[in-house]
Image (tube, coloured by chain):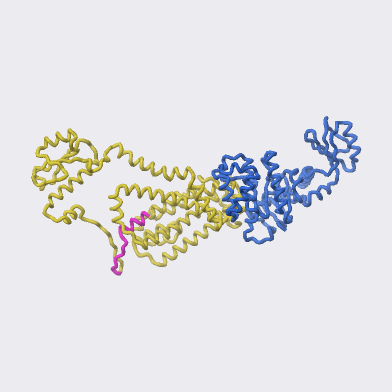
Chain colours: A blue, B yellow
């Protein structure tokens, strides 16, 4: 296993942040650690990197040899920061040197990555002259410039425009194809759904879902309709819930409702240009699990 | 390469190129120079000796000069002075050998000028009064004492300790305190800023807390030392622009090599103790201003031997002086001061050195723990109770 986490817990000032979490990441896997803000994702990652230590439980990374382990990990933290007065190249060379990589090969790799991220023109600029999105790309390069085996990315897409989002996504997928083990922590479900092999979902410090994306979705069955339409969509018989997004909507069916009947009901209300029966999106599962959890939590307290 | 060296190198280069660093390092000496130089410039009395034209009226008929213009009549001298042909003239009255009275006239007021003129006149008078003596005697009369102090120990051997050694120890103390004050700034700022810059997490994904802190202590400590060295060099250059004062200073100071070696050794150890403390304070403090207040307590403690130096001088082997020799914050200055004054027992040197070394290791270890525990709590100021808890947890 590339990462083995067993029964870790952590509390700050008596407040429990991570409760008895266990999951594994296989070598070469693209793994999603997902959950709402404040669920405990970043705390787990910091424990993986030995920045903070768990109160209990065990963590094994890259077969557990602690010697030089940090050189084999790449990390993009959620808290973004760089030395503002350094140039792009100086920054990357310094951070590379801290990973014990300061040779021609790493320089070439860095230049290659700058090119790929569309940043080669800016390599001699100071960090303070770059836009936020550019700085984020530099940090991503810093995280992977030393060719690590395990790459940990905390919210890699936050604050990126669609163009840069695609660049970053393509790079992550490419790294995945190269056989790197990648852990993505995010609350952006649609990205995870498309990129990750398996996920671990955490809410209020506890694990709530764990498994392959396909398996989790099939567990929820084909009870969802993706709809593209014109008109106004209101209460439809046989539909439990509607997630609107403009001309599109995701409809969750009542248990036992027949999709054909529902389609008839919809057609009588609006003009349908697309209709697809599918498993629910990860987003919907996420919302359901979190809301369910909240109800549970409230009824307990 | 060992990773803390990479950190230290980065910290050094990054900070030494800061505008603030360059401004303070070069601006402060310029400012002091301006303050000191301004009155001299305004007074306009910076004329060199060659610019003085001095005349004299001799009523004793004893004095001859090659450099001064001899007038037979006071009226003529006055006229030349007012016309600007000479800058000064003086009158040697007939009863000079009894009274020593000399009247000096000049066209302008000015204290500095009159000092230089007076010393020229003095030389002229001595040359003439001792006309019959040899050149050496004349020189000796002009500069009769060239002092050097020795202290005899119980066995009657003279130690080379003396005024010069004592001066070195005071210079050491001042230099040491200056270095600490200027470096503590850099260390506090460097550690606090790092917490704010949020680069920390990237760094910690590559290196350990210990490497980071040690790298900072050495890198930022070197920045502080660089500043002090630049000031020192500027000071030396300014002094050597007036070669007489530098030569007379160096001529009087006999630098004893063993004392110098001890001074350097204690300087390095003591400096590291303070640098580690400052880094530890930086780890706890949320702003560098707050850190400076705490740091002040330690710096003042370090200055105690300097403040009470007159007691240490009076009795270098008193209980208090011995006690201060073992306390890591005060031992560097105390030991060097005592070494320059009297015999210091061998065991005292060994113990104080060991205490310093152990303190460095312990303080760094404690700082690492505090650092580790407090680091990721941005903007939150830990209470003393929590700091104690950090020490246990870290």
Q: Quadrant of the C terminus of chain B?
A: bottom right
Query: Quick check: B60 above or below A4?
Result: above
Q: Give the magenta-colored segment's residue range.
A: B155-171
Is residue A295 in sight in this rendering? no
Question: In the image as oriented, which residue stretches furthest toward the top?
Answer: A231
Q: Residue at x 87, y 31 (%)?
A: A269
Question: In the image as oriented, which residue stretches furthest toward the bottom?
Answer: B155
Side of B241 where B25 appears, left or right? right
Q: Is residue B168 magenta?
A: yes
Snapshot quadrant of residue B352: bottom left
Is residue B17 in sight in this rendering? yes
Of the pair B272 and A55, the residue shown nearer to us: B272
Query: Quick check: A202 above or below B72?
Result: below
Side of A1 where B362 appears, left or right? left
Task: Tell me residue A117's x, y (percent).
Answer: 65, 44
Task: Tell me residue B150's x, y (percent).
Answer: 28, 62
Side of A296 where B115 appears, left or right? left
Task: Tell me residue A262's x, y (percent).
Answer: 89, 37
Of the pair B356 and B214, the residue shown nearer to us: B214
Q: Residue at x 31, y 63 (%)?
A: B160
- The number of numbered discs placed on residues in the rendered structure image is 0
Q: Quadrant of the N terminus of chain B?
A: bottom right
Task: Tell me residue B217's x, y (percent).
Answer: 51, 54
Snapshot quadrant of residue A156: top right
Of the pair A209 and B354, the residue shown nearer to us: A209
Q: Is residue A74 magenta?
A: no
């Amino acid at each position: 296993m590339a990462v083995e986490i067993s029964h870790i817990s952590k509390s700050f000032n008596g407040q429990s942040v991570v409760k008895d979490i266990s999951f594994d990441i296989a070598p070469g896997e693209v793994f999603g650690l997902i959950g709402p803000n404040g669920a405990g994702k970043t705390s787990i990652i910091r424990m993986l990197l030995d920045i903070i230590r768990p109160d209990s439980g065990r963590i094994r990374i890259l077969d557990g040899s602690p010697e030089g382990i940090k050189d084999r990990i790449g990390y993009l933290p959620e808290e973004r920061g760089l030395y503002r007065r350094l140039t792009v190249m100086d920054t990357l060379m310094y951070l590379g040197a801290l990973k014990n990589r300061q040779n021609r090969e790493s320089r070439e790799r860095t230049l290659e990555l700058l090119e790929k991220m569309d940043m080669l023109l800016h390599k001699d600029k100071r960090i303070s002259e770059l836009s936020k999105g550019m700085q984020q790309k530099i940090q991503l390069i810093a995280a992977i410039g030393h060719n690590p085996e395990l790459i940990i990315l905390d919210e890699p897409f936050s604050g990126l425009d669609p163009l840069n989002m695609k660049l970053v996504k393509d790079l992550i997928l490419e790294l995945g194809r190269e056989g790197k083990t990648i852990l993505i922590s995010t609350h952006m479900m649609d990205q995870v759904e498309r990129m990750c092999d398996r996920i671990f979902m955490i809410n209020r410090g506890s694990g709530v879902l764990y498994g392959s994306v396909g398996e989790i979705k099939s567990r929820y069955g084909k009870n969802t309709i993706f709809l593209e339409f014109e008109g106004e969509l209101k209460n439809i018989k046989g539909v439990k819930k509607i997630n609107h997004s403009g001309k599109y909507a995701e409809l969750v069916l009542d248990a036992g409702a027949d999709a054909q009947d529902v389609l008839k009901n919809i057609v009588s209300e609006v003009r349908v240009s697309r209709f697809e029966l599918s498993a629910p999106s990860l987003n919907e599962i996420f919302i359901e699990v979190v809301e369910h959890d909240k109800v549970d939590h409230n009824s307990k307290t | 390469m060992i990773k803390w060296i990479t950190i230290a190198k980065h910290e050094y280069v990054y900070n030494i190129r800061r505008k603030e660093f360059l401004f303070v390092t070069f601006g402060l000496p310029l400012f002091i120079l301006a303050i000191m130089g301004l009155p001299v410039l305004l007074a306009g009395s910076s004329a060199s000796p060659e610019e003085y034209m001095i005349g004299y009226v001799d009523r004793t008929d004893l004095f001859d000069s090659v450099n001064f213009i001899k007038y037979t009549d006071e009226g003529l001298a006055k006229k030349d002075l007012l016309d600007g042909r000479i800058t000064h003239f003086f009158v040697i009255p007939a009863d000079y050998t009894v009274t020593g009275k000399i009247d000096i006239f000049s066209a302008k007021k000015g204290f500095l000028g009159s000092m230089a003129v007076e010393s020229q006149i003095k030389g002229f008078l001595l040359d003439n009064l001792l006309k019959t003596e040899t050149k050496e005697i004349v020189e000796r009369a002009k500069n009769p004492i060239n002092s050097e102090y020795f202290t005899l120990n119980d066995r009657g051997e003279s130690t080379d300790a003396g005024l010069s050694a004592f001066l070195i120890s005071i210079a050491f103390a001042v230099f040491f305190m200056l270095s600490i004050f200027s470096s503590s700034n850099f260390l506090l700022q460097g550690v606090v800023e790092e917490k704010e810059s949020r680069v920390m997490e990237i760094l910690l994904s590559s290196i350990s807390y210990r490497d980071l802190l040690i790298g900072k202590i050495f890198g930022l400590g070197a920045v502080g030392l660089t500043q002090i060295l630049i000031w020192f060099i500027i000071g030396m250059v300014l002094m050597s622009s007036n070669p007489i004062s530098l030569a007379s200073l160096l001529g009087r100071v006999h630098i004893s090599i063993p004392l110098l070696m001890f001074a350097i050794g204690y300087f390095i150890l003591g400096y590291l103790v303070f640098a580690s403390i400052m880094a530890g304070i930086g780890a706890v403090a949320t702003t560098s201003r707050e850190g400076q207040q705490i740091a002040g307590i330690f710096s003042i403690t370090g200055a105690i031997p300097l403040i009470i130096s007159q007691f240490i001088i009076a009795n270098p082997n008193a209980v208090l002086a011995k006690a201060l020799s073992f306390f890591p914050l005060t031992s560097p200055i105390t030991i060097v001061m005592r070494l320059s004054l009297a015999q210091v027992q061998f065991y005292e040197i060994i113990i104080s050195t060991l205490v310093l070394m152990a303190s460095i290791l312990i303080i760094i270890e404690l700082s690492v723990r505090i650092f580790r525990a407090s680091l990721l709590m941005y903007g939150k100021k830990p209470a003393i109770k929590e700091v104690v808890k950090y020490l246990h947890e870290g």
